[in-house]
Image: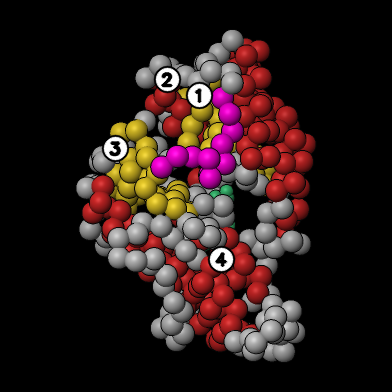
């Protein structure tokens, strides 16, 4: 029996969890910073790092007291999500994990988040969150290679920015998802950017701009459309149709990129993770995909440490540990 303490601080949630043998989640504590970032309508990296420093010890204490009756002595290994994420945020979790592993004399396991169920391999992994939209070829659980990523905004970021320009709250994803359910996805056709026939990369900034122009009008020469006052904010059915049209464009692009990636990798399944995996439109549209598509349970869609500890079990069982000089890695420093 292996008891793993997982730590996650990749973006704006500080999380710790105790997971036994990969699947038995004994505790899963998440301190969210949503309120801190809401007024900026997006994650402010410096604020996130500072909040992680304040939250990490209370979150760890709670996860350990709920999940380990014998305290830290019960822990067999310390796992941490060390990539991808915001560098200042990642550093807090990685430093806490390294310190605990060193002080306890227990192995350190650095994990990159994926789903920990057991779909047929090879698989395509899709990470769609506020910070990332990326496709991975998963040939084995510990053989994961990046094959495509966004060249500008992440899909969750596009949701948050479109929500902001529509005058909605933060995080925008769940709000747009809800409005979209009552809108007509074909009422407004927003562009689908596919970046050429073979590309596995994503681009969402053009779609975001298309929504901006739809709402505020196309700017004239030298005009800054963002600073123009919004005379009539979309409301009622109009707002729902914009949400539905935007969501349909995001979902279509993701589905097409998944189709290409599955073909390229020869995948037998797709595994989805990250905050946008909670999206109902995305889940619905992938119900009849040519290969099985696995989504996490809703409580594991947004950042949490149970996924880190669950995945770390595979590393632990394979004796695959990391040295104490493990570095946090942002997305851009991960090689394809
Ligand atoms: O993975 P996550 O919790 O944090 C990181 O980005 O690391 O993802 C948060 C993102 C936000 O952009 C949020 O708007 C989006 O996930 N999100 C959704 C939904 N729920 C959360 N986007 C679309 N539909 C949803 N239901």
Q: Are marks 2 and 1 in contact (CB under 8 Å)?
A: yes
Residue 219 is tagged as none
- Indicate the quadrant containing the N terminus: top left, top right, bottom left or bottom right: top left
Vertical placement of residue 86 versus 199, above or below: above
Magenta stretch secondary structure, dominant: loop
Is disc 3 surrounded by few (<14), some (14 to 19) or many (20+) residues within 10 Å?
some
In the image, 228 versus 183, the foreground residue is 228
In the image, 5 versus 199, the foreground residue is 199
Does the segment drawn in magenta span residue 192?
Answer: no
Question: Image check: 73 left or right of 190?
Answer: right
Question: Image check: 213 left or right of 310?
Answer: right
**Element carrying mark 1:** strand
Vertical placement of residue 248 versus 106, above or below: below
Distance between the Cα atoms at labels 2 and 1? 7 Å
Is disc 1 surrounded by few (<14), some (14 to 19) or many (20+) residues within 10 Å?
many
Q: Are marks 1 and 3 in contact (CB under 8 Å)?
A: no
Q: Residue at x 77, y 36 (%)?
A: 54
Distance between the Cα atoms at labels 2 and 3? 17 Å
Snapshot quadrant of residue 67: top right
Which residue is label 3 attached to? 139
Q: Where residue 281 sits: x, y (%)?
A: 42, 67
- Say whether disc 1 or disc 4 marks the residue closer to the N-terminus: 1
Q: Residue at x 64, y 40 (%)?
A: 87
Q: Which residues are magenta?
A: 326-336
* Picture quadrant of ligand 1: bottom right
- Say whether disc 2 or disc 3 marks the residue closer to the N-terminus: 3
Which residue is label 1 attached to? 109
Q: Are marks 4 and 3 in contact (CB under 8 Å)?
A: no
Question: Image check: 208 left or right of 41?
Answer: left
Which residue is label 2 attached to? 320
Which residue is label 4 attached to? 159
Is disc 2 surrounded by few (<14), some (14 to 19) or many (20+) residues within 10 Å?
some
């Amino acid at each position: 029996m292996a008891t793993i303490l997982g730590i996650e601080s990749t973006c704006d949630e500080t999380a710790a969890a105790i997971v036994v043998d990969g699947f038995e989640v004994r505790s899963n504590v998440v301190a969210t910073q949503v309120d801190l970032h809401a007024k900026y309508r997006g994650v402010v990296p410096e604020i996130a790092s500072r909040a992680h420093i304040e939250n990490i010890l209370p979150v760890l204490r709670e996860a350990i007291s709920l999940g380990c009756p014998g305290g830290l002595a019960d822990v067999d290994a310390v796992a941490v999500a060390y990539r991808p994420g915001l560098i200042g945020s990642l550093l807090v979790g990685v430093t806490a994990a390294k310190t605990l592993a060193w002080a306890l004399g227990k192995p350190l396991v650095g994990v990159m988040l994926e789903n920990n169920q057991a779909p047929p391999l090879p698989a395509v992994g899709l990470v769609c969150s506020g910070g990332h939209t990326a496709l991975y070829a998963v040939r084995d659980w510990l053989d994961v290679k990046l094959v495509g990523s966004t060249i500008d905004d992440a899909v969750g970021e596009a949701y948050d920015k479109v929500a902001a320009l529509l005058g909605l709250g933060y995080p925008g994803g769940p709000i747009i998802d809800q409005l979209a359910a009552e809108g007509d996805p074909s009422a407004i056709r927003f562009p689908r950017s596919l970046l050429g026939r073979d590309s596995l990369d994503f681009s969402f900034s053009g779609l975001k701009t298309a929504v901006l122009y739809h709402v505020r009008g196309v700017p004239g020469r030298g005009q800054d459309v963002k600073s123009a006052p919004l005379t009539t904010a979309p409301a009622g059915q109009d707002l729902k149709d914009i949400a539905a049209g935007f969501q349909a464009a995001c979902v279509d692009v993701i589905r097409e990129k998944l189709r290409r990636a599955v073909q390229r990798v020869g995948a037998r399944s797709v595994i989805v993770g990250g905050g946008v995996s909670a999206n109902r439109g995305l889940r619905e549209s992938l119900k009849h995909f040519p290969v099985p598509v696995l989504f996490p349970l809703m409580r594991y869609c947004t950042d949490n440490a149970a996924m880190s500890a669950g995945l770390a079990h595979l590393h632990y069982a394979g004796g695959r540990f990391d040295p104490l000089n493990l570095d946090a890695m942002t997305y851009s420093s991960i090689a394809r």
